Image (tube, rainbow, N blue to C red):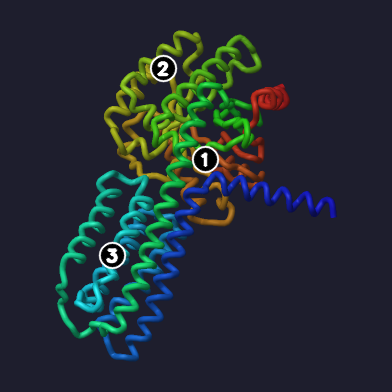
Amino acid sequence: MTALSTFFKQVLRLWHAADLALIGQRRERRMRMLASLVLLLVGSFWGLFFTLRGEWGIVLMDLLMILCGVGVFILSLRNQVRLANLLLFGVIILVIVGTTLLMDPHTAAAPRATHLYLLPIAVAALMAFRDERLWLRYGVALFCLSLFIVLASSSWSPTSAYHLPDEVRVAGSWVQSVAAMLMLFALLHILQSDAAERSVLDRDLQTALREEQFVLHYQPQLNSAGRVIGAEVLIRWQHPQRGLVAPGEFIGHAEQTGLIIAIGQWVLDQAFTQLRAWKDDPQYRDISLAVNISQNQFRQASFVADMLKLIEEYGIDARRLELELTETMIVQDLEDLMCKMVELVEHGVRFSLDDFGTGFSSLSHLKRLPLSTLKIDRLFICDVLTDANSQAIVRTVIALAQGMGMSVIAEGVESDAQRQFLSTNGCLQFQGYLFSKPLPLPEFSAFVRRQND
């Protein structure tokens, strides 16, 4: 019983940690999927009702709601957030406008009420498109408000064939007004709470920087002989109340607020400090450190100068430093990216492309950049033994890297069978839980001594 109780406690603790790491994304995903279910149920109910009455114009609108519900659900499962939101809001706005014009005309006895739903939809758009460009975020909301003004100021209707009788609409206008206002209140409350959470997180991150609450963990990178040749530097937040916080809980917010630049600079300072400490130690001096560089950080005009200053100040061998870029960075500001990379490579700094195969880079981009390493994403490694497509992709990446004179390292290696498959196909560098999880510095140092002695 004790073992079973411990197991369930561990499961609950892991679930809680995972939920915290993705709380914002999961909440929005649940809201989208709930909205898709509501559209599906409402569309099915009224579609059947109006089919029996033979009012086919309304049936087509209900069919659109059903198809939208299915589409949003599928897109949410595939994590295609933007497409799901565009489809959801597009159809909802169309249905509200169509229902208002066809079924809810303004009369002396009963004013329009369906168009009131455009107010909470406008607020919901601000939340759903929060991380999109300003023209999309505010454009959808302003479009809803513009439609609300037009419908509220007009009694025009294209046809009277579907008008509901006034006696029905009098009671309906009260119900719809109350429902729309309750929705508006609930969404405003969520928006305010979300803003408060972000404000608290912003304040806590600034405190973390000031009080140096961040710590680095090191995930070993090994060669085919089992020797540690490097490590990926991974940041953690040692929060005074919440304990060790994973980067997924704060890196996204830091990117949006610009704090990622200061955090990234702190990580680089710590990495240089560690490389300097290992410089004169025969056991560690050949170990390199891979540091993830954010897009905002790399875009800084002074990035190259700051890096060269750190190299000179700490007196390290720049070849021991590897900066990890993502594919998203490659397709944006390619010329600036290439110029900065070339200058740093001339001083010995190496570059790797992280999560290769999951982004949007093309081979034409790849051949122009002075990369030294391609990293195969764990997405392909996890099912490389069972999925023929993953096997083909992994073999192709390995061959591509070798053909272009680059090394290749596989992330997320969790079984000896995966390691054996990779070795057989020419990948001779590995990173993953088969060897070690990310470790605090003392544990990483002990791991290196065990593996390299």
Q: Identify which amino acid the numbered label 1 is placed on.
A: Gly
- CA separation, marks 3 and 1? 33 Å
Could you say which disc has been placed on residue 93 in the image? 3
The residue sitting at the front extreme is 109
Q: Identify which amino acid the numbered label 3 is placed on.
A: Ile
Tell whether 141 sits left or right of 240: left
Residue drawn at (21%, 65%) of the image = 152
- CA separation, marks 3 and 2? 50 Å
Q: Position of residue 268 (x, y in %)?
A: 48, 21
First reached walking from the N terminus: tag 3 or tag 1: 3
Q: Residues within 10 Å of mark 1 (few under 14, many from 20)?
A: some
Q: Residues within 10 Å of mark 3 (few under 14, many from 20)?
A: many
Q: Identify which amino acid the numbered label 2 is placed on.
A: Met
Q: Which residue is mark 2?
A: 307
From the viewer's perspective, is residue 111 above or below residue 297?
A: below
Residue 416 visible to the viewer: yes
Q: Which residue is mark 1?
A: 248
